[in-house]
Amino acid sequence: MKFDLDGLTVYFPYERIYLEQYQYMRSLKQTLDAGGHCLLEMPTGTGKTVCLLSLITSYQHAHPNTGKLVYCTRTVPEMNSVMEELGTVLAYRSEELRKEREAMAVISSSAVVGDAMDIESAAGSQLVDNPNNNFNGSNNDAITNGNGDANGSNNEQQHQNRQPRKRKRIYGPKKSQPQNQLGPISHNNGAGGSGVLALCLSSRRNMCVHERVMRESDREAVDAACRSMTAPWALERARKARHNSGQGEGDGGNTASNNGNIETCPYFDGFQSAGEATSMPSGVYNLDELKKWGKSKSWCPYYLTRQAINHASVLVFNYQYMLDPKVAKMVSKELESESIIVFDEAHNIDSVCIEALSVTIHERHLEQATRSLGRLSSEVSRIKASDATRLQAEYQNLVNGLVDQGLLDAPPNEVGLASNILGTDILNEAVPGNIRRAEHFIAFMKKIVEHLKARLRTVAGPRGGVISETPLAFLHRMITTTSLEAKPLKFAYSRLSSLLRTLQVPNLDDYNALTDVADFASLVSTYSEGSPKFAIILEPNGS
């Protein structure tokens, strides 16, 4: 049904609407008009999703300057459910707009026919009433002095002339058959009747179409396999291998190759080769449709969607893409301020935020971090012997500053190197001199790991127990015990990310424990001042 809501035409894809749904949409419209925030609650099963999508997409259609609709969900099944409902809403609106266009065309055609009939009638009237008309005498006599038969036949002729003409029937185009509601939509001026582009975004595991990578069992393995084929250093090695083997830039290198066993992803290569041509047509794309369309073009669906979100009218993704600083910096940072953000099941927001900015470190993590530092030390020694210029270039970048050199902006294919620290709290200055050298930074991190091991041993002893400290108190004790300075701690995570890129580590998941330690150190030192924003909790169970 289509109805007016305080001056807004709302396209609601069902024949009936509950009073609660109408009130819900009215409250939502009032919030959009005011440009503020609202908290709306409806019982489960009362159709709040279709209310949200119908009202907001109708509002976007009526106000073209409105920003994107960003719909945040918890799980992938919920995401797909929202996309299906959105497809229904936009398909209904498209059909209604088509009917409106046809009705306007019929009205316009009827007006043209009506004007022609009026002109013809006026001409006939002038012919009968004009006294200067030259009728011949026989006809005049037949009308005024003729016998009854002649008069009757003439009256019958006049009666026939007075019969109204039948209006021409104007046939519009036949009603279109039901069209697919998901995927690319080209009929009826595109999705929603106005060329809407609606996308959903998820992790590599849910969007990858590479046959070998799809066979990996878990998310970490998929990320590692993807990174090994799409990281800048991997692409550079493949390019050099093709050059050495005599192949051109466009030859080979699209799969497991003979170029020194360097494998690249054919879909990522195709995406990069297409360049500016990698645009998406109007449509409603759930994960399956994104994979299907990307595979048909030989383009990576994951990176294609990451690029296309700037052109989309509707985005649907997980909470973390909006709330987790690690992901939000690369996905949501370019969203316009006028965007409409919807958190479905909003009672989960607090737990998601806590999880996004929390770091949990166990004793086994610290042992893994120690082993990781040993591997990094060996790798640094190897690089110094074989390619010392690489480490020297990194050192110069660190002197010039993290932000200026783009070292804090992880490449789009290296999400695992992003930091938890909010962008406004990052220092835009040179990295402290005592951690610029790779070997010095490794020694710095070893001190942090050993201090955390010692702290966990104290709470696990007979006199131990749960301890809660403020970041300032924890930081003061760390500095006093280890003789470390507070400022370098703020750069721990970014410095580690820079080193891992310089060493061209293919599997970052092998260093998860060490990155957790560096992240913890950066968070403690960054948010130690002012009112306490965090709490450090030490428990005797080793965490």
Image (tube, rainbow, N blue to C red):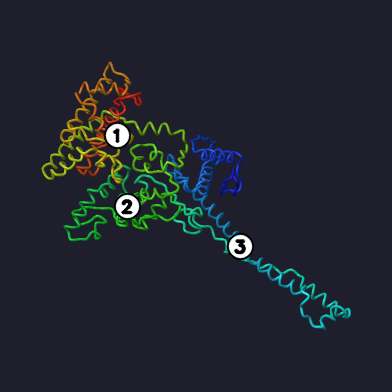
Q: CA distance from mark 3 to mark 1?
A: 62 Å
Q: CA distance from mark 1 to mark 2?
A: 36 Å
Residue drawn where x is 21% and y is 55% of the image: 239
Q: Position of residue 47 (x, y in %)?
A: 54, 42
Q: Amino acid at mark 3?
A: Ser
Q: Is residue 61 above or below residue 449?
A: below
Q: Amino acid at mark 1?
A: Ile
Q: Is 527 positioned to the left or the right of 109 in the image? A: left
Instruction: Determine the secondary structure under disc 2.
Output: loop
Q: CA distance from mark 3 to mark 2?
A: 54 Å
Residue 210 numbered tag: 2
Q: Which residue is mark 1?
A: 426
Residue drawn where x is 56% and y is 47% of the image: 10
Q: Is residue 242 above or below residue 460?
A: below
Residue drawn where x is 29% and y is 18% of the image: 464
Q: Categorize mark 3 by other alpha carbons within 10 Å: few (<14), some (14-19), many (20+).
A: few
Q: Which residue is mark 3?
A: 108
Q: Amino acid at mark 2?
A: His
Instruction: Determine the secondary structure under disc 3.
Output: helix
Residue 396 numbered tag: none
Q: Is 264 positioned to the left or the right of 135 in the image? A: left
Q: Is residue 312 above or below residue 367?
A: below
